[in-house]
Image (tube, rainbow, N blue to C red):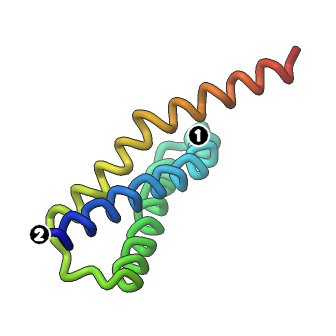
Amino acid sequence: MGEDLYIFFACVLLGGAGGVVYDVFYPVRRLIERKTRKFAAAADVLFFFLFSLVYVAASVVFAFPALRWYMFAGCMAGLILYLKSFHRILAFFCDMLYNKRKK
């Protein structure tokens, strides 16, 4: 049970790191979305492909056991937590810096 909890929290952190990568992809996605919706969907697919590669690399490095449902849940929870909390905090500070620079 203890190892499962460790793996779950590692997956939550991995999901949070995925949120940071999503923040990098987001401006590119918005620029592409203006042109066509098909390429915006391709950017999302590329993000999840890269995230899955990072997950596989982390599972090898940390010697995760076979894929379990709580690993997927941990990754999704970390991504959602990032997007609902840290992303908003980061966006607030970026807007604040942008507005100060404009003045």
Q: Residue at x 36, y 80 (%)?
A: 62
Q: Is residue 89 above or below residue 79?
A: above
Give the amino acid at mark 1: Arg
Q: Residue at x 71, y 22 (%)?
A: 96
Q: Which residue is mark 2?
A: 1
Q: What number is the disc on residue 58?
A: none
Looking at the image, which is closer to me, 99 or 50? 99
Instruction: Say left or right for 7 vs 20.
Output: left
In whole angstroms, how far apart are the C-alphas of marks 1 and 2?
42 Å
Direction left: furthest residue = 1
Instruction: Say left or right for 74 vs 79.
Output: left
Quadrant of image for the C terminus: top right
Q: Residue at x 82, y 19 (%)?
A: 100
Q: Name the spot of residue 37 as percent of width and height, x first.
A: 48, 43
Dot 2 lies on which element?
loop
Looking at the image, which is closer to me, 97 or 53? 97
Q: What number is the disc on residue 30?
A: 1
- Viewer-side label of 1, 2: 2
Looking at the image, which is closer to me, 37 or 74? 74
Instruction: Tell me the crowding category of disc 2: few under 14, some 14 to 19, or many 20 or more residues within 10 angstroms, Cα based.
Output: few
- The number of discs equals 2
Instruction: Tell me the crowding category of disc 1: few under 14, some 14 to 19, or many 20 or more residues within 10 angstroms, Cα based.
Output: few
Give the amino acid at mark 2: Met
Q: Quadrant of residue 64?
A: bottom left
Q: Is residue 54 above or below residue 60?
A: above
Quadrant of image for the N terminus: bottom left
Direction front: furthest residue = 2
Instruction: Say left or right for 91 vs 67.
Output: right
Q: Name the spot of residue 44 as percent of width and height, x first.
A: 45, 53
Looking at the image, which is closer to me, 37 or 20? 20
Q: Is residue 47 above or below residue 91?
A: below
Q: Residue at x 17, y 62 (%)?
A: 70
